[in-house]
Image (tube, grey):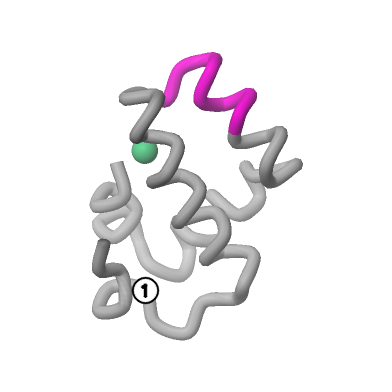
Amino acid sequence: MNFSDELPALKFELWDYVIIHELLHFSVPNHGKLWKSLMRSHLGEYEAHEGELKRIAGNKALQRTR
Ligand SMILES: [Zn+2]
């Protein structure tokens, strides 16, 4: 994984989002109900981080994590 070029200076919460997002794809290949419930159990209200990431990095960087 190499996010450092695309996502500079993120808050810890946002790194958690990116890293857990990616790790969950080892067991869940999509963003379906199971993925969402696992995200929520690890991160709580992760949608807020998702929105913040989009504002900071734009859609391009977020798509790289899929
Ligand atoms: Zn994804």
Query: Residue at the bottom extreme?
Result: 9
Residue 15, image x, y percentages: 52, 66
Residue 51, image x, y percentages: 55, 52
In the image, residue 24 lies in the stretch drawn in magenta: no
Which corner quadrant holds the N terminus? bottom left
In the rendered view, does 5 fall on the left or right side of 24? left
Residue placed at 25% from the left, 79% from the top? 5
Residue placed at 32% from the left, 53% from the top? 59
Residue 21, image x, y percentages: 46, 44
Which of 53 and 25 lies nearest the eye of the viewer?
Answer: 25
Query: Residue at the top extreme?
Result: 33
**Label 1 Cα crowd, 10 Å radius (few <14 / some 14-19 / many 20+):** some
In the rendered view, does 39 fall on the left or right side of 61? right
Considering the whole magenta stretch, tell me its main secondary structure. Answer: helix
Relative to 12, residue 17 above or below:
above
Q: Amino acid at mark 1?
A: Leu
Q: Is mark 1 within 8 Å of ligand 1?
A: no
Residue 14, image x, y percentages: 56, 64
In the rendered view, does 16 fall on the left or right side of 58? right
Residue placed at 51% from the left, 48% from the top? 20
Q: Count all numbered tags in the image, as a single digit.
A: 1
Element at badge 1? loop
Q: Which residue is mark 1?
A: 7
Where does ligand 1 appear, by image quarter?
A: top left
| Chain part drawn in magenta | 31-38
